Image: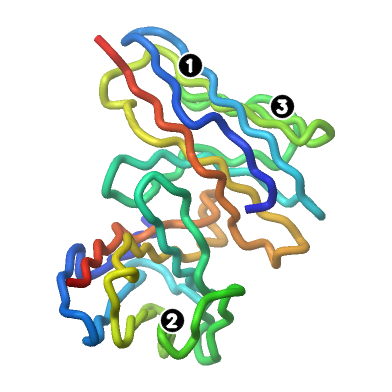
Amino acid sequence: GAVVSQHPSRVICKSGTSVKIECRSLDFQATTMFWYRQFPKQSLMLMATSNEGSKATYEQGVEKDKFLINHASLTLSTLTVTSAHPEDSSFYICSAEVLDRGIGYTFGSGTRLTVV
Amino acid sequence: GQNIDQPTEMTATEGAIVQINCTYQTSGFNGLFWYQQHAGEAPTFLSYNVLDGLEEKGRFSSFLSRSKGYSYLLLKELQMKDSASYLCAVTERSNDYKLSFGAGTTVTVRA
């Protein structure tokens, strides 16, 4: 239980284009979702917190106009990387808070973004 | 993260025991998590400690000392599949209880 489905798992896009990543909670309602970015051999860095029906809260140094987050329902949050550049190439992971199953947070399977 | 420190790499032999230490500094500590992450995959939950003491779950155990800001993850009877990165993460009141991760410890299990 407490599964988050993340798509796509891998995406290659050209510089200047936009890419949308989706995370869906399959068997629970995710009021809050978190978006992380992870560079090779580094830790997960929190980018933003999305709350259903309200604006996302971005961490310091993360451009909100570049990383658009939408959390329109209790089961879906999306991250859109706009005008992607090669330096945006990274592993993006979503996570949802699971309040009643003793695990705290569950993670999506991640999206490997490569911008060429 | 909130000054979360853990060793970068550890190597051990199949069948052996490895202990991964994690120290942290927080304001309003709320809990500590350990996750396992294989390369290119998302983290998977291993353990959660909020009170002092040892939590045992099969081959994996996790210990917490809140007064010392210290935790360890103990992996027993190591198997090749345990080769992965192990992430220590904390939640704290001053950070709205969001997860803050350490850099991870890469464990390599050798035959």
State the image quarter where residue A77 is shown: bottom left
Relative image position of residue A79 (x, y in whole percent): 36, 79
Q: Name the residue tied to disc 3.
A: B53
Q: Are marks 1 and 3 in contact (CB under 8 Å)?
A: no
Q: Which mark is residue A74?
A: 2
Secondary structure at badge 1 equals strand
Q: Earlier in the sequence, mark 1 or mark 3?
A: 1
Query: How far from the left and from the top, in percent, is residue A101?
Result: 51, 53
Q: Marks 1 and 3: same chain?
A: yes
> Which amino acid, by three-letter code, is at mark 1?
Val
CA–CA distance in space, label 2 to label 3: 36 Å
Figure quadrant of residue B11: top left
**What is the x, y in percent for residue A114?**
21, 66
Residue at the location (40% across, 36% down)? B85
Quarter containing the N terminus of chain A: bottom left
**Up/down of A30 relative to B61, above or below:** below
Residue A11 on image: x %, y %: 17, 69
